[in-house]
């Protein structure tokens, strides 16, 4: 990025004894992975937190699922998630999304991140980082339906099946659900995985 081509009045550079350097505004512009001058790339590249919530009823593990009401996931049933805002931590995003979409206030733990890059017809279709958070401790009363979708508790086996959708699945969610089922979630090491779907 040739910031020096812009006028100094824009504030991207600041004068120092040795010449010029990037100002805080300039550093912020260069460090931003979502360039404002390319709205298509900006739309395709994002961070979406995944919120996995579990409970035990009569010694049976259940996972909170949602039947989505919005596109591009309309009608899909699975665990919930949503965009992480700039300046927001993964845990803050998980708590916010869970409370807004379900009415539950969860005590979330970060488990790891799955990056999913998808291509269709040799064109980049989606590039998303999915930090995955988990809560088995929560308070509040479940809201059964919101503008986001219908919230339902499903068995752990059904939750695993719901996440095995093929092209747009997120493999790490299945791994986490299996760890919950096998009671090995506390032994799960923080992970980072990348998958490319063509």
Image (spheres, helix red, strand yellow):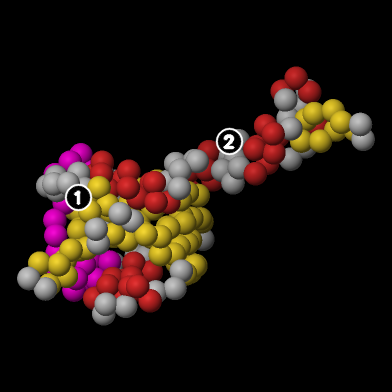
- Please state the total of marks drawn on the protein image: 2
The crowding category of the residue bearing disc 1, from other C-alpha atoms within 10 Å (few below 14, some 14 to 19, many at least 20), is few
- Name the quadrant of the N terminus: top right
- Tell me where residue 182 appears, x and y as whole percent: 26, 80
- Reply above or below: 113 against 95: below
What residue is at 61 percent from the left and 42 percent from the top? 32
What's the mark number on residue 101?
Answer: none
**In the rendered image, which residue does mark 2 sit on?**
36
- Which type of secondary structure does the marked residue at label 2 adopt? loop
**Residue extending farthest top:** 9
Residue 158: tell me if it is visible. no
- Tell me where residue 31 appears, x and y as whole percent: 65, 44
- Tell me where residue 142 appears, x and y as whole percent: 14, 48
User: In this picture, which residue range is highlighted in magenta?
Assistant: 145-163
- Reply above or below: 85 against 159: above
Give the distance between the C-alpha atoms of the residues marked 1 and 2, in whole angstroms.
39 Å
Residue 191: tell me if it is visible. yes
Q: Name the N-terminal-most of marks 1 and 2.
A: 2
In the image, taking residue 107 as reference, residue 155 lies left or right, namely left
What residue is at 46 percent from the left and 69 percent from the top? 190
Is residue 85 within the magenta segment?
A: no
- Which type of secondary structure does the marked residue at label 1 adopt? strand
The crowding category of the residue bearing disc 2, from other C-alpha atoms within 10 Å (few below 14, some 14 to 19, many at least 20), is few
What residue is at 59 percent from the left and 46 percent from the top? 33
1 or 2: mark nearer the eye:
1
Tell me, yes or no, whether the two marked residues, 1 and 2, touch with CB atoms within 8 Å: no
In the image, taking residue 188 as reference, residue 102 lies left or right, namely left
Q: Quadrant of residue 19?
A: top right
Is residue 160 within the magenta segment?
A: yes
What residue is at 15 percent from the left and 67 percent from the top? 56
**In the rendered image, which residue does mark 1 sit on?**
139
């Amino acid at each position: 990025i040739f910031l020096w081509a812009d006028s100094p009045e824009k504030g991207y550079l600041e004068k120092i004894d040795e010449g010029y350097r990037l100002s805080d505004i300039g550093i912020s512009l260069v460090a931003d992975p979502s360039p404002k001058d390319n709205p298509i790339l900006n739309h395709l590249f994002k961070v979406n937190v995944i919120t996995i919530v579990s409970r035990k009823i009569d010694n049976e593990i259940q996972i909170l699922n949602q039947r989505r009401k919005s596109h591009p996931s309309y009608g899909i049933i699975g665990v919930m998630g949503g965009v992480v805002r700039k300046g927001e931590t993964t845990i803050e995003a998980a708590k916010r999304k869970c409370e807004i979409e379900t009415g539950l206030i969860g005590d979330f733990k970060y488990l790891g991140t799955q990056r999913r890059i998808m291509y269709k017809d040799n064109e980049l279709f989606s590039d998303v980082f999915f930090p995955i958070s988990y809560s088995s401790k929560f308070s509040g009363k479940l809201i059964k339906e919101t503008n986001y979708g219908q919230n339902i508790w499903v068995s752990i086996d059904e939750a695993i099946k719901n996440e095995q959708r093929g092209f747009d699945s997120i493999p790490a969610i299945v791994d986490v659900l299996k760890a919950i089922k096998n009671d090995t979630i506390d032994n799960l090491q923080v992970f980072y995985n990348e998958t490319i779907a063509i």
